Amino acid sequence: MTIKQSKGFTIIELLVVIAIIAVLASVVLVNLTQYISKGKDAAARANLSTLLTNAAVYYDTNSSYNTFNGAASTTYQNVLTALQNAGYTITSTCDSGAACPATATKFCASVPLKATSNIFCVDTAGNKKEGASSTCAAGVCP
């Protein structure tokens, strides 16, 4: 009596292997997109911190934040462009509203983060806050 030996895999074995690979790939994909969002959030935090430093230099030079968050400020526009290219929307205000008048003494900027539903905010008091609060107003982080 001879025993017939099969060569290869059964269809069930192949389907099980494909299912395991699909589950592993989906787990990796979910984690990868989360890590990408966290990386972009870290870059947004760094950009806002740089913006805060540049705002302080601007204030020291001009004794006001007048036009700092407008088209006249190349520093602000460069950071705005970098954040917009990464898919962020920056909100900036001064102590008397969105436009910075000649009497402005406070400056605040914030962006909504991607990895969480929080807002990251910097202001002239040196605050760098992340929280669920709304965007900054009157030149102060909430």
Image (spheres, grey):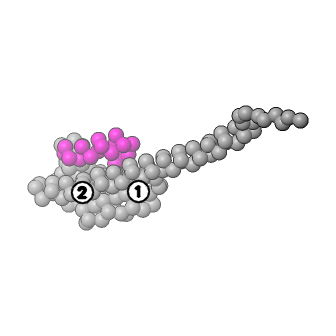
Q: Is residue 12 left or right of residue 96?
A: right
- Total count of labels: 2
Q: How many C-alpha atoms fall within 10 Å of the one at disc 2: few (<14), some, or many (≥20)?
A: many
Location of mark 2 (residue): 52
Residue depicted at x 84% and y 36%: 3
Please state the horizontal and vertical placement of residue 17, each as a whole percent of the image.
67, 42
Q: Secondary structure at mark 2?
A: helix
Residue depicted at x 45% and y 60%: 132
Q: Disc 2 to disc 1, how far (Cα)?
A: 16 Å
Q: Amino acid at mark 2?
A: Leu
Residue 82 covered by magenta stretch: yes
* Residue 7: mark in rendering: none
> What is the span of residues highlighted in magenta in the rendered image?
73-90
Q: Pick whichever, 115 or 19, lies toward us.
A: 19
Please state the horizontal and vertical placement of residue 34, each as a whole percent of the image.
48, 50
Please state the horizontal and vertical placement of residue 119, each as a whole percent of the image.
40, 56
Please state the horizontal and vertical placement of residue 57, each as a whole percent of the image.
15, 56
Image quarter hosting the N terminus: top right
Q: Is residue 100 left or right of residue 22?
A: left
In the picture shown, does residue 5 fall above or below 135? above
Q: Is residue 16 left or right of residue 41?
A: right
Location of mark 1 (residue): 119
Label whose residue precedes the other's in the sequence (2 or 1): 2
Q: Secondary structure at mark 1?
A: strand
Seen from this angle, which residue lies furthest right? 1
Image quarter hosting the C terminus: bottom left
Residue depicted at x 65% and y 45%: 20
Q: Pick whichever, 22 or 116, lies toward us.
A: 22
Residue 39 covered by magenta stretch: no
Q: Pick whichever, 62 or 31, lies toward us.
A: 31
The quarter holding residue 124 reads: bottom left
Residue depicted at x 30% and y 43%: 82
